[in-house]
Amino acid sequence: MEIIDLRSDTVTQPTPAMRQAMASAPVGDDVYGEDPTINRLEKLAAAKMGKEAGLFVASGTMGNLTAILTHCGRGDEVIMGNLGHTFLFEAGGVAALGGVHPYTLPNLPDGTLELEGIAGAIRGEDIHAPVSRLLVLENTHNRCGGTPISAAYTQAAGDLAHLRGLSLHLDGARIFNAAGAYQVPASELAKPADSVTFCLSKGLCAPVGSVLCGSGDFIRRARRIRKQLGGGMRQAGILAAAGIIALEEMSDRLPEDHARARALAEGLCKIQGLELTMGMPATNMVFLSLDEGVTLTAAQIADRLAEKKIKVGVVGAKRFRLVTHYWIDDAAVEQTIKAFSAAL
C-alpha cells in the first residue's frame, strides 16, 4: 500500500514528464546568464505573472527574502500580517540577515489586512522611527485556511501602499491555486504587486525552486541579493526543466485538488468528534479540530492514521491541516475519511 501523504503539498514528487525533461535539459552556467533552460523558465514565469523579468531561486523563503532585501535597506520597515509565512516560518531572515524591521498587523479570517490598519501603520517623517518601505501580502493565505485573496483587494492595498510611497511584494507561493479558485489568470492577481514570488515545488510538483518576478530593474538588483544569499547556482537548468513542465502542464489542473479538498472536508465533518475549523476549503487546505468530547490529542490520532499509512499535519493540540495535491486521488480521499472514522 502506498503512503497517503496529506501533510502538505510540499511532499509532491516530480511527474514522469518532469524527470524526463530534467534528464535531457540543455544547461549552462546560470551565474554567467548562459543556462538556456533557466532563461526559458524565467521568461515563462515573468509572462505568467505579467512582469518584465524573473529570477529562479532555491525556495519560496529565498524568494521572499531576496525581494524584501531588494526593496528595503537596513533600518527600513516592512508591514506584514502576523499570520503570514514571511513572519512565522522564515526564521526571522528579514531581520537577522537584512536588518529590516517587521511591523505586524492582525490578519483577518480571509487572510487580508484591514486597509485602515495598513494606513495607520505607515509612518510619517520622524528621525526616531524606521522608514516604512514595503507592504507584504500572501496569496493564498496558508494559516488562514488556504484562502485566496482577490485582485480587487490586492489592487486596493497596492494603491494605498503606492500612494504613501511604499512598494508591494506578494508572497504568491500558491498564487496558481488562488487563480484557479477565482478562475482568473495569475497575472491578474499579481498585477498590483511590484514583485511576486511563487513556488514551483508545491502543487505544481516540481522538485525544487521558486521564481521571483518584477520589473527588469528590480530583478537586476535582486540578482545581486540572490548571490549574496548563496543562491547563484550554476547548471541549474536541470531543476528549471521541471519548473517549465510545472507551468505548462500543472498550473491549470489545481481546481482538481480543490474539489478533492472539498470532498475530503465534506466526508470528515460527518464524523462525530470532528469539526471544520475554517469552514469548507476554498482551495486545497482542510483545517479541522477534535471537539471537546474527544479525549485523544491530534498527535495521537495522527499516530493511529500513520499505522494505516496515512500522514496528516498536526498544527495544534487538537487541530489538523490536510492538504490535497496531484498525488492525492479520489481513492485516497475515501481511505482517509474511513481511517479517521476508525481512529475515532
Image (spheres, rainbow, N blue to C red):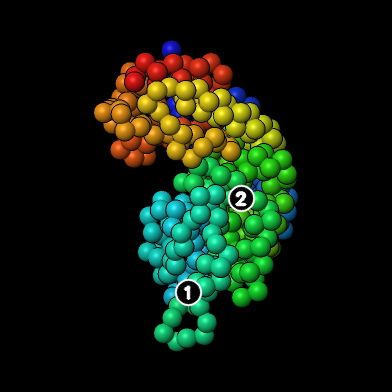
166 on left or right of 109? right
| Nearer to the camera, 249 or 234 | 249
Q: Is residue 318 above or below residue 65?
A: above
Q: Is residue 341 visible?
A: yes
- Disc 2 vs disc 1: which is toward the camera? 2
Vertical order, 189 against 201 (above or below): below
Q: Is residue 205 left or right of residue 5?
A: right
Q: State the residue at coordinates (59%, 72%).
A: 166
Residue lying at 52% horizontally and 85% vertically, measured from the top left = 125
Q: To which residue does mark 2 refer?
A: 149
Mark 1 lies on a secondary structure that is strand
Image coords of residue 22 (percent x, y): 60, 33
Position of residue 95 measured from the top left corner of the image (x, y, whole percent): 40, 65
Amino acid on which the number 1 mark rests in the picture = Asp
Query: x and y percent of residue 249 in the render?
Result: 68, 32
Image mark for residue 76 = 1
Q: Rate crowding at label 2 as few (under 14), some (14 to 19) or many (20 or more) other CA atoms within 10 Å.
A: many
Quadrant of the rendering where the N terminus is positioned: top left
Q: Nearer the viewer, residue 311 or 155?
A: 155
Q: Image quadrant for the C terminus?
A: top left
Q: Is residue 290 left or right of residue 244?
A: left
User: Which amino acid does the dot numbered 2 rest on?
Assistant: Ile
Picture quadrant of residue 23: top right
Measured from the top left, where is residue 189 in percent x and y?
68, 52
Between 234 and 333, the one lying in front of the other is 333
| Vertical side of 134 occupied by 329: above or below | above
Mark 2 falls on what kind of element? loop
Between residues 70 and 84, which one lies in front from this camera angle?
A: 84
Q: In this rendering, does residue 69 appear at all? A: no
Residue 187 - label: none
